[in-house]
Amino acid sequence: LYGGKVYKYNPLKGDWVQFIEKDEPVTPPPVTPPATTGNRGGIAISGLEFAEMTLPGKANQNYNTNSKQRYQMMADNKFSVARIPFLSGRLFNTNGTINEEYAGYIDQNITWAKEVGMNAWIDAHDYARYRGNPLGSANYSVSEFVRQKVEIIKRFKKHTNLVGFEIDNEPHD
């Protein structure tokens, strides 16, 4: 979401493509192309989404915050996009504000990807749930879901190597 329009990154064109029409004209954000060549494939860098039943959990005890070395190993193997799964139930405090400590770990993962020449794709790995409550229930309304996604976009849009945002992984029920 950028300037009232929704875009997706098309790696074949190497550019952002508008896929939902809105009224207001806008220029999509710039994207830093990855420095790696070859495979051009993506890979999930798991860790931040571990222990979804332990919220908020403790870094490097309940979930892994990863390392720059892990990203370097993926870049060395010609991966150009890192998918970074996270939990909204960990990113948002129970009062609805962003947990800045956890957001900082997401920032760090995106930065490590950039430092080794990779783009990043963040993934709300929530299964259409928030803290165990299914989307559309009394404890997790659709409006709260949308509010959270807008806050995520606002929080992480500063990263020039962020090429995508999966709003919800594997929704079910």
Image (cartoon, grey):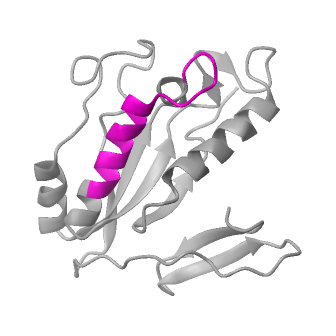
Residue 90 appears in the picture as rendered: yes
- At horizontal 25% and vertical 30% (from top left) the residue drawn is 64
- At horizontal 50% and vertical 36% (from top left) the residue drawn is 125
Residue in the foreground of this view, choosing between 149 and 12: 149
Q: Position of residue 110 (x, y in %)?
A: 34, 54
Determine the residue located farthest toward the right in the rendered image.
Answer: 23
- Tell me the quarter of the image containing the N terminus: bottom right
Q: Is residue 1 above or below residue 88?
A: below
Give yes or no for residue 101 being in the magenta stretch: yes
Find the magenta span and give its range: 93-111
Determine the residue located farthest toward the bottom in the rendered image.
Answer: 13
- At horizontal 74% and vertical 40% (from top left) the residue drawn is 146
Q: Position of residue 111 (x, y in %)?
A: 29, 56
State the count of labels.
0
Q: Is residue 162 left or right of residue 105?
A: right
Q: Is residue 5 above or below residue 14?
A: above
Residue in the foreground of this view, choosing between 42 and 65: 65
- At horizontal 25% and vertical 35% (from top left) the residue drawn is 65
Give yes or no for residue 127 being in the magenta stretch: no
Q: Is residue 50 above or below residue 85?
A: above
Q: Position of residue 7 (x, y in %)?
A: 65, 70
Residue 49 appears in the picture as rendered: no
Q: Position of residue 132 (x, y in %)?
A: 59, 15
The quarter holding residue 151 reads top right
Q: Is residue 39 left or right of residue 26?
A: left
Dominant secondary-structure state across the stretch colored magenta: helix
- Tell me the quarter of the image containing the C terminus: top right
